Amino acid sequence: MPNEICILCGKETNVDINTHIDHRYGYVEGAGQCCKECYNKTSNIEEDYVTNTMRNRTTLLTISAEDILGTPNDMQLGAKVRQQYWDTYGKPEKVPNQWVCGLCGKDTSNVDYDYLFGVDHIECHLKEEMKNDPSWNVN
C-alpha cells in the first residue's frame, strides 16, 4: 500500500495510508501526516518556518458554492478568498504584490492572461529563451 506524504516537506513517510490516525506518529489533526523529522522539529521550536507553515496549513476558510459559482473568473475568486482571509484574521501590515514578473520585475496585475506565463510576461520569457538559445540568432 502507498505511504502518506509529509504535509511540510512533501517527502514520503513510513506511515501506511490505511493506518488509523490513533496509531500514527506525527499525525496533526486537521492538517495531516508529518514525517518523523518535521514532526520532531515542531515540538521544540517557538516561532519559525515550520511553526508558521503548520499554522498556515491548518488554517481553513470556508467559501460558499454561491461565491464560487457567482464569481466570473479565477482572479476575482482568488481576490475574494484573500479578502475573506484578511477579514477573518487581519490584513498584514505589508502585503507583497503577487503579480510581478520574475524576469523584468514589473507589475503584471493588469495584464491580460493571454500575455502571461504564470505571472510573468510571455515576452520576457521569449526574450530570455532567444538570449540563451543560439538557434534564435536574430540580427
Image (cartoon, rainbow, N blue to C red):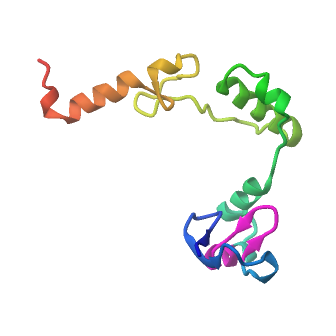
Q: Position of residue 42 (x, y in %)?
A: 71, 72
Q: Nearer the viewer, residue 89 or 80?
A: 80
The answer to which image quadrant residue 25 occupies is bottom right
Span highlighted in magenta in the image: 26-41
Residue at point 75%, 34% (across, down): 82
Up-down relation of residue 1 to residue 109 (above or below): below
Q: Quadrant of the C terminus?
A: top left
Nearer to me, 23 or 51: 23
Note whether 55 is above or below 24 in the view shown.
above
The residue that appears at 83% across and 33% down in the rendered structure is 65
Q: Is residue 43 left or right of residue 5?
A: right
Q: Residue at x 64, y 73 (%)?
A: 38
Q: How many marks?
A: 0
Q: Residue at x 72, y 63 (%)?
A: 51
Indicate the quadrant containing the N terminus: top left, top right, bottom left or bottom right. bottom right
Q: Nearer the viewer, residue 20 or 89?
A: 20
Left or right? Give the position of 104 relative to 88.
left
User: Looking at the picture, how far across and down is residue 137, in whole percent?
Assistant: 13, 25
